[in-house]
Amino acid sequence: MRKLTVEELGRMNSDQFRLSSKLPVTIVLDNVRSLYNIGSVFRTCDAFRIEQIFLCGITATPDKSLAEIHKTALGAENTVKWNHFKDTSDAVKLLIAEGYNVIAVEQVDKSRKLGEYDIEEGHYALIFGNEVKGVRQDVVDMCDSALEIPQYGTKHSLNVSVSVGIVLWEFALRLNKYLR
């Protein structure tokens, strides 16, 4: 086996990315603190070609020339469309008005396991929360449903950027017709 070069991978450039079809998913970050997590989410969202990221509350934005975001995003902060909202509930209200299926990725009493959730055609907004407190309860209350990533060890949570990757992989598998 030989590692492929960047040219052999045939990746699109930034202009092609902007014009390409997107996975009908918006990622919402609810008060995510770590700049490295934010950058990692941008990079993952670029890999899965999602529609956009909503950065909410204290979640930092890439326009502040934050080296930590750039260090992990590796330029994806320049390809993935993003918007900032002072409060996550404002972002959720907009997404609901636009007809998105709004889902909290959180451990709640009525959450569904990720592999057991029916992902059908439509637009989805996936809300991921703060590294310590998770998705705010008032935001969970606004959601259509909640997804939970099955876990089998002693810890009760995963890093937020890892969670985004796992959930987006599942959505990309089921909605991949949009990425052609």
Image (cartoon, rainbow, N blue to C red):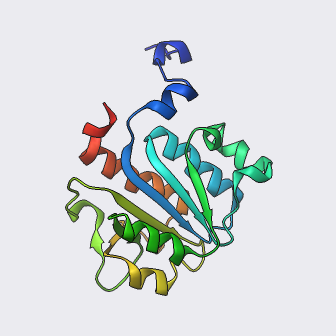
**Tally of numbered discs:** 0
Q: Which quadrant of the view contains residue 79?
A: top right
Indicate the quadrant containing the N terminus: top left, top right, bottom left or bottom right: top left
Residue drawn at point x = 57 percent, y = 48 percent? 42
Residue 104 location (% of width, % of height): 40, 72
Residue 154 visible from this viewpoint: no
Residue drawn at point x = 46 percent, y = 72 percent? 92
Residue 43 appears left or right of 144: right
Q: Residue furthest front?
A: 97
Q: Is residue 106 above or below residue 117?
A: below
Residue 55 visible from this viewpoint: yes
Q: Is residue 66 above or below residue 118?
A: above
Residue 150 location (% of width, % of height): 33, 67
Residue 179 location (% of width, % of height): 33, 35
Q: Which quadrant of the view contains residue 131?
A: bottom right
Residue drawn at point x = 40 percent, y = 85 percent? 141
Q: Which is more toward the observer, 153 or 49?
A: 49
Residue 158 location (% of width, % of height): 50, 65
Residue 40 appears left or right of 51: right
Indicate the quadrant containing the C terminus: top left, top right, bottom left or bottom right: top left
Q: Which is more toward the observer, 111 or 17?
A: 17
Q: Which is more toward the observer, 39 or 53?
A: 53
